């Protein structure tokens, strides 16, 4: 699939067939994530692949009530969770080198470059999945405490986002986008 077509036709998929995803395709989408840019090429994002049904159910249960992506995590045969350790991207030898308040988060005060890196990697991953005929949906709203033990999350590591990965059982609606004229400014 041509890149621009993939960008435009990728949709958030919230219903899946239970058909298994060949391991080769799982590796391909992870490979796409691996080649994402990252701050100073530090490559701090980590990808947890979960196939176990019980663990996927725990992931689904960690979503806030009413989150329409919850069922997707139990239907699709694979879930991928992107994780990272705050205080690594944007730091050299323990010192924050990016400066400025733009990269700070109020909760950790350790900067949020790791979130930016993870977002770039996940965008690569979801586009590659789409090009391979697979569906995904970013899930950003979940209760980490409810699932950290089930996935043996190491101390200091944060779960940032997750996605189911599988064959879509429906196309997904196309939410509109703002016009470029609302989004783009020239010179000022
Ligand atoms: C950071 C982030 C978090 C998201 N979290 C959720 C989520 O928790 N549940 C869900 O159903 N969709 C979630 N989405 C998907 C968005 O709702 C979706 O991308 C948006 O409505 C545009 O639709 P499209 O992806 O089909 O173009 C998330 C998207 C992003 C980028």
Image: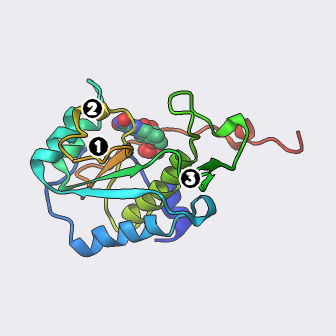
Label whose residue precedes the other's in the sequence (2 or 1): 1
Q: At 60% from the left edge and 56% from the top edge, which residue is drawn?
A: 93
Q: Position of residue 136 (x, y in %)?
A: 34, 52
Q: At 37% from the left edge and 32% from the top edge, which residue is drawn?
A: 141
Taking depth in this image into account, of 129 and 60 the one nearest to the observer is 60
- What label sits on residue 89 in the rendered view? 3
Inter-mark Cα distance, 1 to 3: 31 Å
Neighbor class of circle 3 (other Cα within 10 Å; few <14, some 14-19, many 20+) is: many
Label whose residue precedes the other's in the sequence (1 or 3): 1
In the rendered structure, the answer to whether residue 153 lies left or right of residue 100 reads: left
- What label sits on residue 14 in the rendered view? 1
Neighbor class of circle 2 (other Cα within 10 Å; few <14, some 14-19, many 20+) is: few
Q: Position of residue 4 (x, y in %)?
A: 56, 63
Label whose residue precedes the other's in the sequence (3 or 2): 3
| Residue 135: quarter of image | bottom left
In the rendered structure, the answer to whether residue 36 lies left or right of residue 64 reads: right
On the question of residue 102 being in view, the answer is yes
Cβ at disc 1 under 8 Å from ligand 1: yes
Neighbor class of circle 1 (other Cα within 10 Å; few <14, some 14-19, many 20+) is: many
């Amino acid at each position: 699939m041509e890149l621009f077509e993939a960008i435009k036709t990728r949709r958030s998929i919230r219903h899946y067939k239970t058909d298994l995803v060949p391991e080769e395709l799982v590796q391909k989408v992870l490979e796409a994530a691996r080649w994402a840019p990252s701050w100073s090429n530090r490559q701090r994002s980590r990808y947890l692949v979960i196939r176990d049904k019980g663990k996927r159910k725990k992931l689904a249960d960690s979503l806030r009530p009413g989150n329409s992506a919850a069922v997707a995590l139990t239907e699709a045969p694979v879930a991928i969770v992107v994780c990272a350790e705050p205080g690594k991207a944007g730091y050299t030898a323990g010192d924050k080198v990016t400066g400025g308040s733009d990269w700070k988060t109020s909760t950790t005060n350790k900067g949020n470059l790791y979130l930016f890196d993870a977002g770039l990697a996940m965008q690569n991953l979801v586009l590659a999945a789409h090009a391979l005929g697979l569906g995904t949906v970013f899930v950003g709203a979940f209760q980490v405490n409810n699932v950290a033990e089930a996935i043996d999350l190491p101390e200091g590591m944060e779960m940032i986002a997750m996605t189911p990965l599988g064959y879509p059982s429906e196309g997904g609606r196309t939410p509109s986008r703002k016009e470029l004229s609302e989004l783009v400014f020239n010179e000022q």
